[in-house]
Image (cartoon, grey):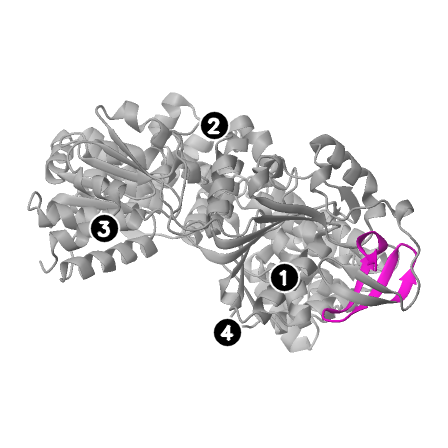
Amino acid sequence: MTISKNNYLSELNTEQREAVESVNGPLLVLAGAGTGKTKVLTTRLSHILHSNIAHPSEICTVTFTNKASNEMRIRVENMIGSSIAGWWLGTFHSLAARILRSNAELVNLKTTFTIIDTDDQIRLIKQILAVENIDEKRWPARSLLSIIQRWKDMGLNPIDVKNVHHGGTDFANDQAIKLYQNYQNRLITLNAVDFGDLLLHVITIFKNKPDIKKLYQNKFKYILVDEFQDTNASQYYWLKTLAENHKNLCAVGDDDQSIYSWRGADVNNILNFEKDFKNTKIIRLERNYRSTGNILAAASHLIAKNQNRLGKTLWTEGDMGNKINIRTVYDGREEAQSISDEIEAYQRNNNSINNVAILVRAGFQTRTFEERFLKIGLPYQVIGGLRFYERAEIRDAIAYLRLVNSSDDQLAFARIINKPKRGLGEMTIRNIEQYSRSSKLSLEMAARKLAETDEISTKAGTSIRLFAKNLDKWRIDVNNHKLGDLAEIILEESGYVEMLKKDRSIEAPGRLDNLKELINAINEFDSLPNFLEHIQLVMDGSNNQNVETAKIMTLHASKGLEFPLVFLPGWEEGLFPNQRSIDESGESGLEEERRLAYVGITRAKNDIWIYNANSRLTHGQWIDCIPSRFLDELPEKNINKFSFYSNNLSRNSSIASEWLIANNKKQKILNYKSYNETSEFKIMERIFHQKFGYGKVSEIDGDKVTVDFEKAGQKKLLLNFIEKI
């Protein structure tokens, strides 16, 4: 090896070095955000090799993602100066697959087994439901897949589920366990596995073949695992089993960043580590190399409210930096406008917008930002997901609206004729397409004509006639309902909403929320053609390849990333913390929401803006919002100010007043005066605004005023926020 022990250890702080050199026995490294956990893992691996206490084949290093695995691989290769190809370094699934390939026959597989993806899983489950004569409309394949995945995350085979009778067995009148067994049998017949099987089959082998288990327990003298707080029951059992002999399990993680319970992660794995592994040594990495002092102090104060945590406090040798800015705005549109103004100001100061991230709690929140950014020409990129109007459920809903608007829209018809399922098979669809081409009719008209013949089955004909009847009704409804109401009617009467309600996948609630946000968007337009034209312009203008972009993503997708400037919108009760999480999981759900807030704050290196709105538009109705409890849990000394931005406060003055009284923080509200106390202003009168500076009044409209500012240009504001000079 080409590395010097003194060189690689000299780059570590005291706690990092202790974590690297404490090689024997169970070790839990509580690594806070930005404290250098990857450096500790890679240096520890290199140190074990440099000390000649283990061969590369005797070390198992586990990550959660291929990205993390590749990053670690590159770092280790740079440290030791040679390739590490063939080492046991990779994700849980890749390492489990490697073990399974060598022992496939023990679970009735061949070594050439295929790993199937989600689409193949759904297709296979649909076949199984058909064999059992189970109506897939009523009991969706995706719902059963979610139940099976949950069981596999828990390390449960069908026989295990039967013995302990875990949740989900009400599917198809208590047939879920039987269907799970049929699914597993079918996979074996196909010589295939899904991702959940990779760990589950290895666990089964370890349970049934003690000699194989002992072989791997003896083999791996040292086990290192990253992001330990994200392990599920299956992963934890696998790790614990492998470490039983040598006891040298090093788990690196942060209980304060455990935010994935919805996909099986169990924070108790890290909280109970010391109980499960006797003589555990715990090392806390608390020195942060990412964020300023104010950011770290606020994050630490917030997360300290959680009861179920092992405890640590982040600190930095850097300066305190700017305080956290908290801004209350009137509504979601003003929130997007305010944030875009801040980004443009940041850009004017010769900063790259690549440095900017907007982190939302729910995917539907991205819509207002996307439309605002497109309107003003601010390049953006949605990370870890699709742009709002590219999401499948949004495209489906828009396809319904397009077809209602024009019976000649062939693409729209093809997209939604069998979505949700209407009992139209591939042959029926093919007949419609062929008849459309031969008769030079639109697909809709061809379908209507075929439905009156014996060219297609009676069931298919009935289904098409019902769909056509609905189309006729909706085209009349266009003239009798507001656009938002029309969209709701179509989505309900088509069965699309009911389809999503029956979908038990973790994505389904978010898809319903996205449809609600689409209805909000539709309500902003006076005609269906205008809305559809707007959508086309949005989609045409959303290509920002090879340019600097502001990043929009969910808080979940932001974990592991960092940005100089971070915006955190939507900090309101019900939205964040998310009411669904609290309703489903109670106090543990609230604590996970708080951990998510902690993750969001610690993504920022230099500056944070946190926003909450007085009201949100939901289903065409203005809903008063209560500021998130998390705002009240931030330390006052690290907060810059609470301030109202602009627009008509009087429209929502009651909620503002209630908030002021409830939180007893009137001293934090800057420049707030009731409208009745505001002096009269005159046209061309010179005024001052704390944000925009000096200007002259050009127009007065009730309690709103238009001002031509000397530097900021023309702005429309409330009289409450300007001062005479």
Discs 1/3, front: 1
Q: Position of residue 414 (x, y in %)?
A: 62, 65
Residue on which the image places disc 2 = 167
Per the model, the C-alpha gap separating discs 1 and 4 is 23 Å
Residue on which the image places disc 3 = 42
Q: Pointers 4 and 2 in contact (CB under 8 A)?
A: no
For badge 4, the amino acid type reads Gln
First in residue order: circle 4 vs circle 3: 3
Disc assigned to residue 342: 1
Q: Pointers 1 and 3 in contact (CB under 8 A)?
A: no
Discs 3/2, front: 3
Whether residue 12 appears in this view of the structure is yes
First in residue order: circle 1 vs circle 3: 3
Disc assigned to residue 471: none
Q: Position of residue 324 (x, y in %)?
A: 57, 48
Q: Position of residue 448 (x, y in %)?
A: 73, 63
For badge 2, the amino acid type reads Gly
For badge 1, the amino acid type reads Glu
- Is 127 included in the stretch rendered in magenta? no
Disc assigned to residue 545: 4
For badge 3, the amino acid type reads Thr
Q: Which residues are drawn in magenta? A: 698-725
Q: Position of residue 475 (x, y in %)?
A: 81, 60
Q: Which quarter of the figure is the N terminus placed in?
A: bottom left
